[in-house]
């Protein structure tokens, strides 16, 4: 609920049904039997395999990275300035 309410407050083109419906859909609430998870790494590899978005917008440490694989899994490549994960990314 907190995420949906924050989006409602921040978005200029807020749509109640789309916002709350999508939050419920991805949280797994409802009668849909499928197990839904947003997989950010596989989505990025599919739609932006060279990491143009990450290089431009994510953070200054990744803007200088040449290896495309390291852009999407920086915790595996010991990038200077990149913090160690608090939670194991494999979970």
Image (spheres, helix red, strand yellow):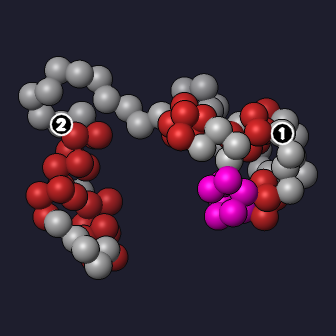
User: In the figure, is residue 37 to the left or right of 59?
Assistant: left
**Quarter of the image where one finds residue 25:** top left
Residue at numbered disc 1:
67
Vertical relation: 59 (above or below) 39: below
Vertical relation: 12 (above or below) 64: below
Tell me the magenta residue range.
Answer: 52-59
Give the residue at x 67% y 53%. Answer: 52
Give the residue at x 79% y 58%. Answer: 63
**Quarter of the image where one finds residue 53:** bottom right
Looking at the rendered structure, the secondary structure element under dot 1 is loop
- Magenta stretch: helix, strand or loop mostly: helix
Task: Report x, y in % for residue 39.
Answer: 48, 34
Residue 56 circle label = none
How far apart marks 2 and 1 lie (CA) works out to: 38 Å
Visible in this render: residue 82? yes
Q: Mark 2: few, some, or many residues within 10 Å (few <14, many ≥20)?
A: few
Task: Report x, y in % for residue 66.
Answer: 86, 45
User: In the figure, is residue 70 to the left or right of 52?
Assistant: right
The verdict on residue 77 being magenta is no
Looking at the rendered structure, the secondary structure element under dot 2 is loop
Residue at numbered disc 2:
29
Give the residue at x 11% y 58%. Answer: 17
Task: Report x, y in % for residue 73.
Answer: 71, 37
């Amino acid at each position: 609920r907190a995420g949906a309410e924050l989006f409602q407050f921040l978005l200029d083109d807020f749509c109640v049904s789309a916002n709350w419906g999508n939050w419920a859909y991805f949280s797994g609430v409802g009668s849909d039997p499928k197990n839904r998870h947003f997989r950010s790494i596989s989505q990025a590899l599919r739609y932006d395999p060279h990491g143009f978005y990450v290089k431009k917008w994510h953070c200054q440490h990744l803007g200088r990275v040449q290896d495309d694989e390291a852009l999407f899994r920086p915790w595996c490549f010991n990038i200077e300035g990149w913090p160690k994960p608090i939670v194991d990314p494999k979970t």
